[in-house]
Image (cartoon, helix red, strand yellow):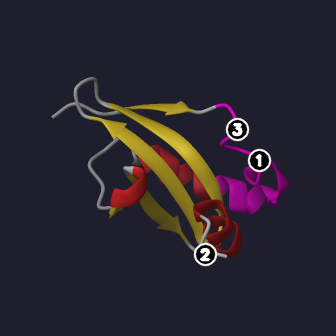
C-alpha cells in the first residue's frame, strides 16, 4: 500500500498560526499520520473527513485516484463549529 501525499489549501492555517508552538506540533504530528490509512469521520454534506488531535479538528479531502489528502481546515472545536456553520 502506498502513502498519501499531503497538500494544503491556501487558507487552511488561519487558526493554526494563532496556536501555541506545542499545539502546532501536536497538530502537525496528526497531519503526518494522514499519509497512512487512518480512521476518520466522513462529513457527507461537504465531502470531507475530520480527525481529532486532542481538542483540535483537522478537516481534509481525499482523492483516492492520485492518493492525495488536502488539508482544508484546522481549529479548535468552537472554530470548527463556526467553520461548519453550526454556531
Look at mark 1 in the image and give the residue it sits on.
Answer: 14
Q: Which residue is mark 2?
A: 55
User: Where residue 1 sits in the image (x, y, percent)?
Assistant: 15, 34
Q: Quadrant of residue 22?
A: bottom right
Tell me which residue sits at (61%, 75%) in the image: 55
Specify which label sits upstream in the sequence, 2 or 1.
Answer: 1
Question: Which one is in front, 9 or 53?
Answer: 9
Answer whether residue 58 is magenta in the image. Answer: no
Q: Are marks 3 and 1 in contact (CB under 8 Å)?
A: yes
At a point 60% along the width and 50% down the height, the residue shown is: 73
Say whether disc 3 or disc 2 marks the residue closer to the N-terminus: 3
Left/right placement of residue 5 relative to residue 65 reads right
In what element is the residue under mark 2?
loop
Estimate the x, y position of residue 76 in percent, counting from the top left: 67, 69
Q: Position of residue 79 (x, y in %)?
A: 70, 67
Within 10 angstroms of label 3, few (less than 14), some, or many (20 or more) residues?
few
Using the image, determine if residue 64 lies above or below residue 22: above
Label for residue 11?
3
Verify whether residue 19 appears in magenta.
Answer: yes
Q: Nearer the viewer, mark 3 or mark 2?
A: 3
Task: Give the spatial CA distance, label 3 vs label 1.
Answer: 6 Å
Q: Would you identify the image quadrant in which residue 40 lies?
A: bottom left
Amino acid at each position: 500500500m502506498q502513502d498519501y501525499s499531503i497538500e494544503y489549501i491556501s487558507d487552511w492555517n488561519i487558526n493554526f498560526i494563532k496556536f501555541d508552538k506545542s499545539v502546532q506540533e501536536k497538530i502537525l504530528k496528526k497531519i503526518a499520520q494522514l499519509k497512512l490509512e487512518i480512521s476518520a469521520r466522513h462529513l457527507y454534506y461537504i465531502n470531507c473527513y475530520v480527525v481529532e488531535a486532542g481538542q483540535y479538528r483537522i478537516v481534509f479531502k481525499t482523492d483516492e485516484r492520485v492518493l492525495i489528502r488536502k488539508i482544508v481546515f484546522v481549529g479548535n472545536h468552537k472554530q470548527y463549529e463556526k467553520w461548519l456553520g453550526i454556531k
